[in-house]
Image (cartoon, helix red, strand yellow):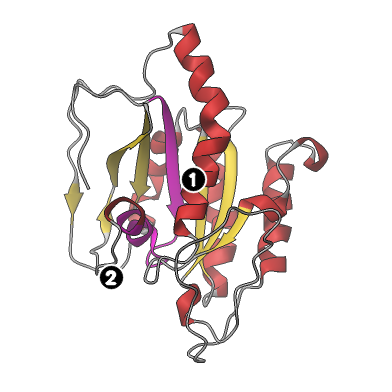
Amino acid sequence: MHQATRTKKPDVKVVILGDMNVGKTSLLHRYTERKFKDTISTVGGAFFLKQWGPYNISIWDTAGREQFHGLGSMYCRGAAAVILTYDVTNWQSLTELESRFLSLTDTANADCIFALVGNKADLTDAHVDVDEESQPVVTCPTPPTTPLMHKQVSREDAVALYGRVLCYKGLEEKDCLPAERMCFETSAKTGYNVDALFETLFDLLLPSILKKRSEGESSTVDLETPLEIKRTKGGCCA
């Protein structure tokens, strides 16, 4: 992935939040580099710029470790979309989103879009249910059918949390994007549903991008001051 340069200003900002080892960095690698590779734990945060058609979208990969928790609200400042990520084989990773990470989004935009993403679908002993009518066509391979691990987080659990996220933000479900459209199960390893996740978000952000450009607003992040990105060895996924 390429670090941002001074010549490219982001139109909108997307932030990925979640506990350590849920695969946040791996999801980004799969989408931007079209491959899966072992990653090292993110320290603090890492900033990437994705060119989507004529638009530039900044994607912030944040650290899930407790010692970097305080940085999360800073990275969420001005975010137009937040991807709340958990591991479908780890129930605790879902509860951590509500207990530790949701409050960090208080600094995001008032009209911020939320997506709930259960990663590591390739490790489960259950097929991933995809609503073909509500989600984009996925050309990536599906998770293997060979049973490997028990799936601890169901789609219904994710949908219920999505409703609580909206309640926390003071939003009415009837006025927001439906949970069926904003709850995904993905596999960074196989590529399952990864494109659908990011492309759906980017499509939904297009009105915000056009509004910002028409109003001539400044970028969501100051790129004139280089961001020091540090990584350290740790778990395989950040």
What distance separates the C-alpha of mark 2 from that of mark 1? 28 Å
Q: Classify residue 187 as left or right of residue 173.
A: left
Three-letter amino acid code at the position of disc 2: Gly
Residue 25, magenta (yes or no): yes
Identify the residue at horizontal 28%, vertical 40% (top origin): 47
Q: Which residue is denoted by mark 2 in the rendering?
A: 235
Q: Residue at x 59, y 64 (%)?
A: 95
Q: Is residue 148 above or below residue 162?
A: below
Q: Horizontal and vertical percent for residue 117?
A: 54, 58
Image quarter in which the C terminus is found: bottom left
- The answer to whether residue 101 is magenta is no
Give the numbered dot on residue 199.
Answer: 1
Q: Position of residue 24 (x, y in %)?
A: 39, 58
Element marked by disc 2: loop
Extent of the magenta region: 11-30
Q: Nearer the viewer, mark 2 or mark 1?
A: 1
Secondary element under disc 1, as helix, strand or loop, is helix
